[in-house]
Amino acid sequence: GQYNVYFASGPAAFKGSWEDYIKIHPSTLKTVKIFRIGRPRTDVLFSNKYDRTKTLSSLGLNPGKKTVLYAPTFQKEASLEQCGLDIINIVSSMDINLLIRLHHLSLALDNPNARIRGHGGKDWRKILKKIDSENINVRFVEGDSTPYYVSSDLLIGDVSGACYEFLLQNKPVVFIDTPKFFVEHGMGGISYWGRTSGDIVSNLDDLPNVVRYNLDNYKHK
């Protein structure tokens, strides 16, 4: 009763939230209008606002090299906290550019919820800035993720929504398997079944070959 209009960002919001809700509270239909609007924040991916060459050059990276974006989510059961440094070390040793953009809660040292559910007090900003300074092909980035989606040829993710925004560009995603996450949070959502849209890596020894194959065969999935 505190609003008059509901903008549904997609079929999950409409069918999973709105339709279930009005079955329980049908009187809502008398007071609230519903509009299906898509997800406007992703429109900028296709607006030509960002230029790959300019973005990578501004970071001191070679635009002529393939570029990989590592964009994990924040929970302690996900890839960053489980094996993030191993992933970064493996990919940074390849002849490619590596961008690292974390979920904002991975960087929220003063947030008690983030500390308990995620980083545990680890200062990822400090850690990644050091890695950035020591590797000419690695850049730790913050802020709006869109220019980095546009500039990257492949995304390495886990259960983050970033994976599915990136897929809108018809570029490949490699998913790091996160079994502890699914034990804790269940297997009912897109974070589990959506991974069929890319290759899933359960053994990090396989990561370089999977990344390279997907870079060379971007229509693979």
Image (cartoon, helix red, strand yellow):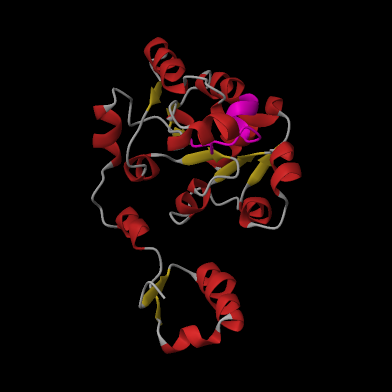
Q: Point out residue 140 in the picture as x, y percentages from the top left corner.
A: 39, 25
Q: Is residue 173 above or below residue 85?
A: below
Q: Point out residue 136 in the picture as x, y percentages from the top left corner.
A: 38, 15
Q: Is residue 34 above or below residue 47?
A: below
Does 78 lie within the magenta span? yes
The span picked out in magenta is 70-83
Furthest residue toward top: 134
Judging depth in this view, the residue of 152 and 218 nearest the camera is 152
Q: Point out residue 206 in the picture as x, y percentages from the top left corner.
A: 69, 29
Q: Point out residue 100 in the picture as x, y percentages from the top left corner.
A: 44, 29
- Position of the N terminus, as image quadrant, is bottom left
Does 184 lie within the magenta span? no
Furthest residue toward front: 1
Furthest residue toward bottom: 30
Q: Residue at x 41, y 69 (%)?
A: 38
Q: Residue at x 43, y 33 (%)?
A: 101
Q: Residue at x 47, y 35 (%)?
A: 105
Judging depth in this view, the residue of 80 and 176 nearest the camera is 80
Q: Is residue 210 left or right of residue 124?
A: right
Numbered-mark total = 0
Quarter of image, res 2: bottom left
Judging depth in this view, the residue of 1 and 197 nearest the camera is 1
